[in-house]
Image (cartoon, rainbow, N blue to C red):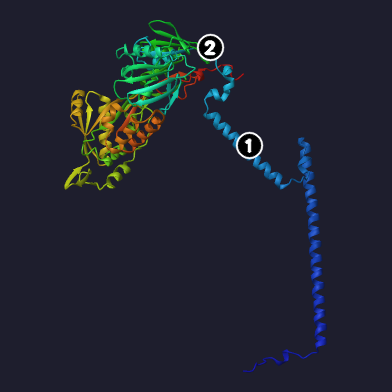
Amino acid sequence: MSAKIINSHRYKKTTRKKANIKKEQKYKYLNSKKKNDLKYIKQKKKKEKKMLNIESSRLNESKNNVNNLLGIDRTLRGSNIYIPKSFLIICLVLCIVIIAFISKKIVKVEESPIVKVFSSKEDASKKFVKDYDLRVGISGLDTTDLLTSKNVVLKELEKFTTKRLIKVDSNYKIEYVGAKTIDKISNKEYNVLLNDKSNISILDIKNSVDKIKNTKNNSIYYKYINNVESIEEISKKQFKIKLLKDDPYFVYVLDFPIYSSDENYEYKVGSLDGSNILFERFNLKSTIKSINLKNYNDTDKMVEAFRDGKIDMFFASSNNAMQLIGKHESNIKKYRNGETIFILGNKNSKIYSKKEIRKAIVYSLNREEIVREVNSNYGEIIDLPFIYSNIKYKYDIYGASNVLLANSWEKDSDGIFKKEEDENVIRAEINLLVNSEDASKMKIAEKIKDMCYKSGVLINIQSLSQDEISNKVQNKDYDIVLADVLIDNIPDTLYLQEYLNINEETNNALLQVSSSNIENLQTNIENLQNVLSEEVACIGILARNINVVYQKDITGFDNIRYFNIFENIENVGKLNDRIGD
């Protein structure tokens, strides 16, 4: 198909020469037009810039006139200074670092005790009043005899007036003091090598052991020291202790007071009468010259003395004492006094022996609520029969149900979990023994029952007399019992082994402690705590607390614990009023 020309006149014939001439003329015209346009644009921009400069100069002149009227010098602000970008970045980074540093300092100051805020350790002589007489109030002191008194405060102060072989920290770690090494030959025999710098003699140790034994259970150390059969001298600085019965924890007992013939003690007992005991500084770097222990038979009078500034601190174990303080400014610290309440179980109980049941119970208990109901000011949650135990199990009502569901339990029409086992159907139903004469325990038992019911575990409360409970426990005729457990700073579980040894795992952990040497004892005790916690060998409810109440200008009681109220006496003192000068 040929191409068709629609308008033949549209295309005119011409020579190549004429065409090229026309083309050149066209290009010249376009270039000329483009140049004129660019020239016009440049002139226009130049004119606009000139007008802008004129307006800007007028504006600056107006500002200067205003500033002159106000008396303000703006000379520098108008100057054009080139600042490298790298310099600006460095300045920005420095500002961020400085702000972070200042923020950290502010937080540190806010979290620090007032003494650390105002001065450093090197400035201790300035932050504390020198040679201060610390006045301590106590109520109902049983006796002023340091040896036989069972008052924890007095027993701790007694340590300043005696020697000792070891110290024990909050993790049951042993620190050697008078002893250099201690080796366990067996659970009945221990070898002790005295420190070369120690002024303790083996005769001092023998006399001290006899002295405690002669108290006839009137000393808090008696129950442990009474197990000592003999002390055999091997050399001038070495001796062997033989026990009447096995005690894998006996090394911790060696923290008992030793009455040395060398009376170079930290403090000495000064004047002493029927109501006051004075401990006078003798060989210790401390700004506390003396500790004056004032005994009050009436708690109200003791609190009144505190409010009037006649004593610096006292110990409270009731809400009544705290209410009497009123609006008086003071500091308060708590420590466990050893009294605890636990759920202990019978390992022969068909229902309690099941781990999922024990876990369901502990997950069901809102122990914070129980503590609040009983006495929130003087109680805290505890998991294990160790005074320094940590809390592992938290309130988790869904976790309580899930642990049973995961072990093939299902709820019946009454909302209680049941399970088919050995062709029999068993229910999550458990009997709880409670002392009917103890109102506090009865209250706790009712809370336990209500909380467990919500999780599908039925608790039957059997309120009995203490004698009836003892008989049932002895005859293994119970599932669980709500019991008082007295815990001290010695991690002894021998008296609880009957309740804690519930399966092979706990038995092996207990045996590991029993066969442990001194070096591994702390590690094996930690392992025992982990196993007891994992197997829910017992269920801690609460530990009783004591409030240490002290005046706002007294400091140094930040990290107190049982038998460790005055342990860091070097850091205790009265703040100097002129500290800010």
The correct choice, above or below, for 529 with respect to 305 in the image is below
Q: Can you give x and y, in whole percent of width and height, for residue 254 in the image?
A: 39, 20
* Picture residue at 29% right of the left edge, 33% below the top: 538
Q: Please name the residue that numbered disc 1 is placed on.
A: 98
Q: Amino acid at mark 1?
A: Ile
**Viewer-side residue, 563 vs 50:** 563
In which quadrant will I find the C terminus?
Answer: top right
Q: Is residue 485 toward the left or the right of residue 132 in the image? A: left
Residue 331 rendering spot, x and y as whole percentages: 46, 21
Count of numbered marks: 2
Quadrant where the N terminus is found in the figure: bottom right
Q: Residues within 10 Å of mark 2 (few under 14, many from 20)?
A: some
Q: Residue at x 20, y 32 (%)?
A: 478
Viewer-proximal residue, 270 or 462? 270
Q: In which quadrant of the rendered view does residue 428 lie?
A: top left
Q: Which residue is mark 2?
A: 131
163 up-or-down from 88: above or below: above
Where's residue 507, x and y in %?
A: 29, 35
Q: Residue furthest bottom?
A: 1
Q: Residue 61: x, y in percent?
A: 80, 44
> In percent of the image, x 79 and y 47: which residue is there?
58
Quadrant of the rendered structure where residue 482 is?
A: top left
| Crowd rating for badge 1 (residues with CA inside 10 Å; few <14, some 14–19, many 20+) | few
Nearer the camera: disc 2 or disc 1: 2
Residue type at the position of mark 2: Asp
Query: Quick one: label 2 or label 1, which is nearer the N terminus?
Result: 1
- Please identify the residue farthest to the left as the structure is shown: 423
Check contact, mark 2 vs mark 1: CB within 8 A.
no
Tell me: 565 left or right of 121.
Answer: left
Cα separation between marks 2 and 1: 41 Å
For the question of whether residue 471 can be seen, the reply is yes
Q: Which mark is residue 153?
A: none
